[in-house]
Image (cartoon, grey):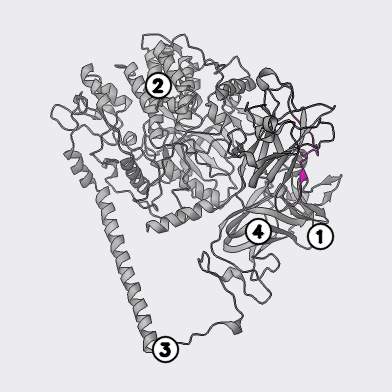
């Protein structure tokens, strides 16, 4: 079983999908040294040892400090520095610097051109942008980097920088390239060039870098660049990089459009996604029929094609992603034929989901059967024969040796089946025992916590799982170890074996399964689950039944020491302070216990279906490419993990796109189930789902007073006094209480190794008695559009809240969330009346973070606020340490704020 799960995980990891350009922005190794010296060459060097190509690394000052060509540079670039990446990468940006030379150098390139090469292209190709421009502007001084986003991006295994000068001069360069490894497997596609439309419009594949000879051959272009065209194809024609490739039926004499794709190796295909225009009022429609063939050698496409017929849509003119199942067919070449349904077919992108096929496959000949009929993932060589050459068994049925072999094989199979059934039954019993309320209860009774803060006078452990009201506990002296605080682990699918060793790496990226999601995922707290949820789980109809007693079942084993929450700490503080100081002696739950507990929680989590007609939309909260978020009034929705209803209440409703692909819907359902397993009092939780009708949506908790940023702006502060909410005043202790709750919620996510990536007051909700819940509803809200900045023209980023390594290195960890928390705390103490670094423009904020990146001592910290005491500001500065490992954890931050706010309780 364990081997099967591991194999499924490996297959899942090998599946390729369309590139996410917003994530393909990492430096590829010039500055870091990941590209070794021997893979950096040049046409010439003024002094190979001092200013040779190996010194042309961005932001490095070694020897001469740059690469300097021997000859002077003119408008006819001939000198070059070449970087060999060895494998094809998608290059999305380039960066250059001059030679600073400790203040002595004055050589820099004011412009340059690029050339790139890849094996299939077979030649050096001069880069041109969408406007056809070759010359790229570079530096104006010797020390600042000039970064240029390539539009369109390029696919290359080698790239050359050729300095360019408008007048003869000596130049020196340091360079870097940005992008990601090209794992889609497509190395070229061939097809007819697009056609012209009235008015001189050319719906060509203008960025195609192969050969143009009546038909496009051996290149890549718009169909694989990751850019999707808009609904209005006219707008796409004028917008750079957002165009369509179009073919006219009359020009083709009614013949279908044929596109051939070549891949790097033989692959197993699961889906193809074709993004089509459907402006039928302008004679553009989705294709009528698609036929898809597969081949190993590319010359003969044998066997029956996959045929897909599209149902004509003359109601909605929006563009759409047409997904076609490929049923695990095998090939290195794929041929697609598209039949016209109207005068025009327009396509913006074609994407394949595929993985490397294991085994050896022979090239087809006219006499060979189709390779698609052959077994998949065979570890032995696949041979093909003519019917006359098929081997015939020489064994006779009556041969006693033959019968003995057959009987022996059957007996072995029966024995293996018996062993498998025994193991399955045994494991099923173990799981039932583990999840039994009686077992958990008996274990709970066996363990006693010695602290005075965790026992009552009778010595009974005060563990109240699932209790959300501190008044439900007995009188003073109890600590409520909440179900939602105790359950801290990394989520896994029910398909994963309990014995598998899960990765808990320091750097884990948030989940980005939805291709249309912006910088953040549609849920800010969902982590990458690919390693833990194989393909076979996605289509599973596993019945997640919840035992009737589940509300009373502890998530963790009772022998694990439990953590303390804000609310229970306040309850504990009704006793004497010396007793509560024993909180320091509490130990954290082990990672293994946490993992096992949350596995079980995920298996037993069911998301209730809620009738859509009982939702009344109140207002739009946020909108993005993922869909729309509304504030709604839900009539009779059950509170989290209970059957209790409180009549009408406000909720947040996240709708998936109306025309979302089937795969995206599967991701949506999976992620909702993962979110539903998160259980913390300071995290906005899932209440239900509406999936029976389109568009599907998830219903999440929303609090009465809205987001924390707006809430703070509408209140006054009265130091050292606690005033009711209606007086529009907040005490300093109340502000600390709010921050402590945020730290508690982030501590929960930290233990799960979840990364939020957009922590700010706009993404926190406020309820009665200053209750706080972390969410992501402020992201995409037009009110906070100024809090986001498009770095290099890419997706908007909250740079004023981001750690330097997230901006410049693309690293997102719980430690980068710690940085964001300190900025959020600064917001809270200023009552959100000031934007972080309000005196700096967005480019100046980036420049300030660059000082931290270079560690030159010139970084400017956020100033100390008027009500900010010394030790709290010191905590903030600790969170802004350059080295992420030196920043405190959320556990430490939470404990510090608890102690700082001893004795406070909201009115």
> What residue is pinned by disc 3?
397
Label 4 or label 2, whichever comes before in sequence order: 4
Residue that lies at the very extreme toward the right in this rendered image = 199
Q: Which one is in front in this view, the residue at disc 1 or the one at disc 3?
A: 3
Q: Which one is in front in this view, the residue at disc 4 or the one at disc 3?
A: 3
> What residue is pinned by disc 2?
738
The residues bearing labels 4 and 3 have C-alpha atoms spaced at a distance of 52 Å
Which secondary structure, mark 4? loop
The residues bearing labels 1 and 3 have C-alpha atoms spaced at a distance of 60 Å
> What residue is pinned by disc 1?
252
The residues bearing labels 4 and 2 have C-alpha atoms spaced at a distance of 54 Å
Is residue 682 visible in the rendered structure shown here?
Answer: yes
Q: Residue at x 21, y 17 (%)?
A: 578
Decide: is 78 above or below 420: above
Label 4 or label 3, whichever comes before in sequence order: 4
**Between 589 and 117, which is closer to the camera in this rendering?**
117
Question: Is 118 on the left-hand or right-hand side of 544?
Answer: right
Label 1 or label 2, whichever comes before in sequence order: 1
Question: From which residue to which does the magenta span run?
Answer: 123-138
Label 1 or label 3, whichever comes before in sequence order: 1
């Amino acid at each position: 079983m364990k081997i099967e799960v591991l194999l499924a995980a490996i297959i899942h990891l090998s599946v390729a999908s369309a590139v996410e350009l917003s994530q393909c922005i990492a430096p590829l190794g010039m500055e870091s040294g990941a590209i070794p010296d021997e893979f950096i060459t040049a046409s010439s060097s003024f002094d190979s040892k001092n200013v040779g190509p190996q010194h042309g690394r961005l932001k490095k000052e070694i020897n001469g400090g740059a690469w300097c060509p021997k000859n002077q540079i003119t408008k006819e670039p001939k000198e070059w520095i070449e970087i060999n990446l060895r494998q094809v990468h998608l290059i999305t940006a380039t960066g250059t610097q001059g030679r600073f030379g400790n203040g002595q150098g004055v050589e820099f390139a004011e412009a340059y051109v690029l050339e790139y090469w890849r094996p299939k292209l077979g030649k050096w190709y001069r880069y041109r942008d969408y406007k056809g421009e070759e010359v790229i502007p570079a530096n104006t001084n010797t020390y600042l980097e000039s970064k240029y986003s390539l539009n369109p991006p390029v696919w290359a295994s080698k790239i050359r920088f050729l300095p360019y000068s408008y007048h003869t001069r000596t130049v020196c360069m340091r360079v870097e390239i940005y992008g990601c490894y090209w794992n889609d497997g497509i190395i070229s596609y061939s097809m007819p060039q697009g056609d012209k439309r009235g008015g001189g419009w050319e719906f060509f594949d203008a960025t195609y870098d192969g050969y143009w000879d009546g038909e496009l051959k051996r290149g890549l272009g718009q169909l694989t660049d990751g850019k999707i065209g808009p609904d209005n194809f006219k707008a796409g024609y004028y917008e750079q990089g957002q165009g369509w490739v179009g073919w006219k039926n009359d020009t083709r004499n009614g013949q279908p459009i044929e596109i051939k794709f070549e891949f790097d190796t033989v692959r197993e295909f699961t889906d193809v996604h074709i993004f089509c225009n459907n402006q039928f009022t302008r004679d553009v429609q989705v294709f009528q029929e698609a036929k898809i063939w597969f081949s190993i050698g590319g010359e003969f496409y044998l066997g029956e094609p996959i045929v897909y017929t599209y149902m004509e849509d003359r109601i909605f003119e929006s563009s759409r992603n047409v997904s076609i199942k490929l049923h695990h067919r095998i090939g290195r070449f794929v041929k697609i034929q598209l039949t016209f349904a109207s005068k025009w077919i327009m396509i913006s992108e074609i994407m394949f989901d595929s993985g490397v096929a294991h085994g050896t496959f022979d090239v087809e000949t006219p006499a060979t059967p189709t390779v698609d009929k052959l077994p998949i993932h065979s570890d032995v060589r696949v041979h093909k024969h003519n019917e006359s050459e098929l081997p015939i068994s020489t064994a006779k049925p009556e041969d006693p040796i033959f019968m003995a072999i057959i009987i022996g094989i059957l007996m072995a199979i029966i024995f293996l089946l018996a062993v498998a059934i025994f193991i399955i039954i045994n494991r099923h019993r173990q799981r039932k025992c583990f999840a039994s309320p009686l077992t958990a209860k008996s274990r709970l009774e066996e363990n006693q916590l010695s602290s005075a803060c965790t026992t009552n006078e009778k010595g009974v452990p005060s563990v109240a799982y699932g209790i959300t009201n501190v008044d439900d506990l007995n009188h003073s002296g109890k600590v409520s170890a909440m179900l939602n605080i105790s359950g801290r682990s990394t989520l896994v699918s029910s398909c994963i074996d309990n014995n598998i060793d899960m990765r808990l790496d320091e750097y884990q990226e948030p989940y980005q399964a939805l291709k249309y999601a912006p910088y953040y995922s549609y849920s800010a707290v969902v982590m990458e689950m690919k390693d833990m949820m194989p393909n076979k789980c996605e289509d599973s109809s596993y019945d997640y039944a919840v035992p009737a007693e589940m509300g009373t079942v502890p998530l963790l084993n009772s022998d694990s020491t439990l953590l303390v929450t804000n609310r229970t700490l306040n309850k504990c503080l009704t006793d004497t302070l010396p007793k509560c100081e024993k909180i320091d002696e509490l130990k954290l739950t082990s990672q293994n216990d946490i993992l096992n507990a949350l596995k079980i929680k995920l298996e037993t989590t069911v998301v209730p279906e809620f009738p859509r007609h009982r939702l009344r939309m109140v207002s739009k909260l946020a909108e993005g490419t993922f869909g729309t978020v509304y504030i709604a009034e839900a009539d009779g929705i059950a509170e989290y993990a209970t059957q209790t209803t409180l009549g009408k209440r406000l909720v947040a409703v996240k709708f998936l796109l109306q025309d979302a692909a089937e795969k995206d819907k599967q991701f949506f359902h999976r992620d909702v189930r993962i979110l539903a397993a998160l259980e913390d009092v300071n995290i906005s939780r899932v209440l239900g789902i509406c999936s029976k009708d389109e568009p599907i949506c998830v219903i999440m908790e929303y609090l009465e007073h809205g987001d924390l940023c707006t809430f703070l702006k509408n209140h006054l502060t009265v130091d050292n006094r606690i005033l009711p909410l209606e007086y529009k005043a907040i005490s300093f202790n109340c502000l600390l209480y709010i921050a402590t709750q945020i730290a508690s919620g982030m501590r929960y996510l930290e233990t799960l190794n979840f990364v939020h990536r957009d922590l700010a007051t706009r993404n926190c909700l406020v309820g009665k008695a200053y209750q706080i819940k972390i969410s992501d509803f402020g992201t995409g809200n037009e009110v906070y559009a100024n809090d986001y900045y498009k770095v290099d023209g890419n997706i908007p980023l909250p740079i004023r809240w981001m750690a330097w390594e997230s901006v410049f290195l693309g690293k997102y960890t719980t430690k980068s969330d710690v940085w964001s928390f300190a900025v959020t705390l600064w917001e809270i103490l200023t009552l959100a009346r000031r934007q972080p670094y309000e005196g700096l423009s967005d480019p100046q904020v980036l420049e300030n973070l660059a000082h931290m990146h270079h560690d030159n001592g010139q970084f400017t910290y956020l100033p100390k606020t008027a009500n900010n005491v010394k030790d709290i500001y010191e905590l903030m500065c600790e969170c802004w340490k350059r080295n992420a490992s030196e920043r405190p954890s959320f556990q430490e931050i939470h404990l510090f704020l608890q102690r700082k706010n001893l004795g406070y309780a909201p009115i």
